[in-house]
Amino acid sequence: MAAPSSEAERQRDKDRTRADILAVATREFADKGYTGARVDEIAARTSTTKRMIYYYFGGKEQLYIAVLERAYSALRASERQLDVEHLEPEDALRQLAALTFDHHEANPDFIRLVSIENIHRAEHLSQSEILAGLADPALGGITRILERGRKAGLFREDVDALDVHMVISSFCVFRLANRHTFQAIFGRDMLDPARREHYRSMLGDLVIDYLTA
């Protein structure tokens, strides 16, 4: 009777080891990029070995893809948990924009990874078997909000869910990705806590003003 318990414990150890590797690898890739990151360094900062990392993931590129999948999956999971179906269309979109704003601010490594992967022209991300469909539920939710807004006579007809996603994402990514250059040029820190709610509200206003223009 002890065998199932032992097997379950081994699986938990495997899951914990894999999660630890991914967490450390996320920081390594975010800090140094795909080219600069070293599997040896990731192994040294975890309770495993380079050989074990290759056993779990297959190689550096596969590990990097797993890091990307983990980062995007976390965002999509938070979007799925957001219940806005009971809200008025404008309030629903403001809530969605605020969720993206909060998530990106709390996960700066995600922004760095996105920037790095764009430098590589998404050559690694495009190899993922799961990332292509991850956004479908989120876009479907936006589509339903837009449809409700149009039926109520609130929203314009020539905007789709991907347009809305692009507006929200561009604001949130710019705020994090360009923080340092923006401050160097204009002397303003876009992550200044005193301005946080101002920017958070600004994002919601941008989305709603665009849809109701």
Image (cartoon, helix red, strand yellow):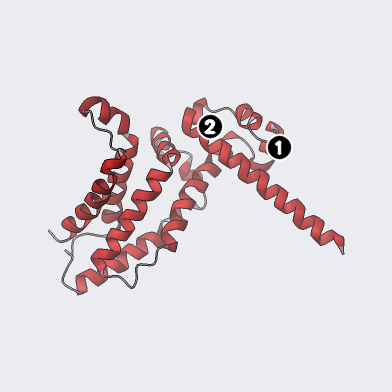
Name the kind of residue labelled 2 in the image: Glu
Secondary structure, mark 2, is: helix
Image quadrant containing the C terminus? bottom left
Are the residues at dot 2 and dot 1 in contact (C-beta closer than 8 Å)?
no
Location of mark 1 (residue): 52
Residue at the image position 44 percent from the left and 57 percent from the top: 78
Instruction: Estimate how packed mark 1 is, as few (under 14), some (14 to 19) or many (20 or more) residues with alpha carbons within 10 Å.
Output: some
CA separation in Å, label 2 and label 1:
17 Å
Snapshot quadrant of residue 181: top left
Q: Position of residue 179 (x, y in %)?
A: 31, 33
In the figure, is residue 35 to the left or right of 155?
right
SS assignment at label 1: helix
| N-terminal-most mark, 2 or 1 | 2
The answer, for residue 131, to whether it is visible in the render is: no
Q: Could you tell me residue 160's position as x and y percent?
A: 26, 60
Would you say 141 lies left or right of 205 here?
right
- Up-down: is 53 above or below 82? above
Check disc 1 and give the amino acid type. Met
